Image: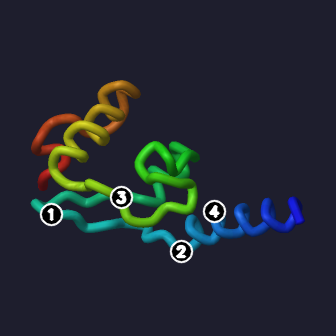
Amino acid sequence: MKKTIIALFALAAFAGTAFAADVIELKKGVTFKHKAHQESLKDCTKCHATNAGGKIEGFGKDFAHKTCKGCHSDGKKGPTSCKECHK
């Protein structure tokens, strides 16, 4: 039974990554390269509630400016200025 539960969890996690969009068009001209982030971070819970992915609760301007920009600043990689994201 335990092996079945683990197998189902793994299947759900990998199925979510297999069907995730490559690029997501957000508001205000922001293009988010989901697949690139997925491959780089390898941890869906950096943004999502679980590794299965899905809708990000509370996603919006404040979330993006705090979480996304914060991650880019901490990792010294990725856009951090307005015009780098909003094209």
Horizontal and vertical percent position of residue 64: 24, 46
Per the model, the C-alpha gap separating discs 2 and 3 is 16 Å
The three-letter amino acid code for the residue at tag 2 is Phe
The three-letter amino acid code for the residue at tag 4 is Ala
Crowding near the residue tagged with mark 4, few <14, some 14–19, many ≥20 C-alpha atoms within 10 Å: some
| Viewer-nearest residue: 26 or 11 | 11
Relative to residue 33, is residue 39 drawn left or right? Answer: right
Crowding near the residue tagged with mark 1, few <14, some 14–19, many ≥20 C-alpha atoms within 10 Å: few
The three-letter amino acid code for the residue at tag 3 is Ile
Horizontal and vertical percent position of residue 56: 36, 58
Per the model, the C-alpha gap separating discs 3 and 1 is 15 Å
Q: Earlier in the sequence, mark 4 or mark 3?
A: 4
User: Comparing marks 3 and 1, which lies closer to the viewer?
Assistant: 3
| Viewer-nearest residue: 77 or 4 | 4
Relative to residue 68, is residue 87 drawn left or right? Answer: left
The three-letter amino acid code for the residue at tag 1 is Lys
Q: Earlier in the sequence, mark 3 or mark 1?
A: 1
Q: Which quarter of the image is occupied by the N terminus?
A: bottom right
Residue 16 badge: none
Per the model, the C-alpha gap separating discs 2 and 1 is 22 Å
Instruction: Provide the secondary structure element on which disc 1 rests.
Output: helix
Circles 2 and 3: CB distance less than 8 Å? no
Per the model, the C-alpha gap separating discs 1 and 4 is 27 Å
Q: Residue at x 56, y 68 (%)?
A: 16
Location of mark 4 (residue): 13
Horizontal and vertical percent position of residue 52: 56, 62
Location of mark 3 (residue): 56
Horizontal and vertical percent position of residue 55: 38, 65
Circles 2 and 1: CB distance less than 8 Å? no
Location of mark 1 (residue): 27
Q: How is this picture coloured?
A: rainbow
